Amino acid sequence: MSAKPGHPNCQIGAGLLAFSNVQRAKQIPVAGENRQRVRTVLNEHWDPIGVVNNPELDDEYDNYVGTVYVMLMDHRMPEDAIYQYLYDTATGYIGVSPYEGLTEKCEKTAAILVGLRPQFETH
């Protein structure tokens, strides 16, 4: 196996896979921490069905954390797209009837999430 020019720690073939796995492994804890922060924001600010005060239901929105994180970081979606996802998820998938304050919750949550993006990028 030969080293790739400019990358002395990277080997062609199986070594390349090993190098990329090492890089990925270094990112996993940070991504996990960032996803935890997304989870916290969804629980504390979005919470369209009002379960935030019930510790037995603190995993209620976990199915949406990955999608929101990917929208935020991988696809770099703007605030209005994240708002729309949150609103549509609440009213469509979860089945909440639109109520006073839901739009504002979704807008505020989207703004908080987009505000976290620069912090996530520095990790």
Image: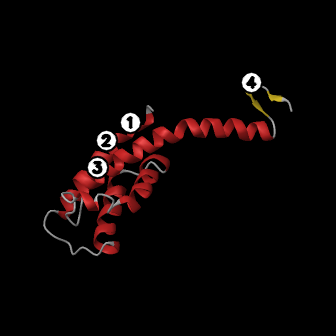
Q: Which comes before the other along the chain, label 4 or label 1?
A: 4
In whole angstroms, how far apart are the C-alphas of marks 1 and 3? 16 Å
Q: Disc 3 on helix, strand or loop?
A: helix
| Residue linked to disc 2 | 115
Mark sitting on residue 6: 4
In whole angstroms, how far apart are the C-alphas of marks 3 and 4? 41 Å
Mark sitting on residue 41: 3
Amino acid on which the number 4 mark rests in the picture: Gly
Residue at 41% x, 41% y: name it.
Answer: 33
Q: Which comes before the other along the chain, label 2 or label 3?
A: 3
Residue at 34% x, 41% y: name it.
Answer: 116
Mark sitting on residue 118: 1
Q: Which comes before the other along the chain, label 1 or label 3?
A: 3
In whole angstroms, how far apart are the C-alphas of marks 4 and 1? 29 Å
Binning the other alpha carbons within 10 Å of mark 1 as few (below 14), some (14 to 19) or many (20 upward) gives few
Label pair 1/3, CB-CB below 8 angstroms: no
Residue 98 in picture, x, y percent from top left: 20, 72
Amino acid on which the number 2 mark rests in the picture: Gly
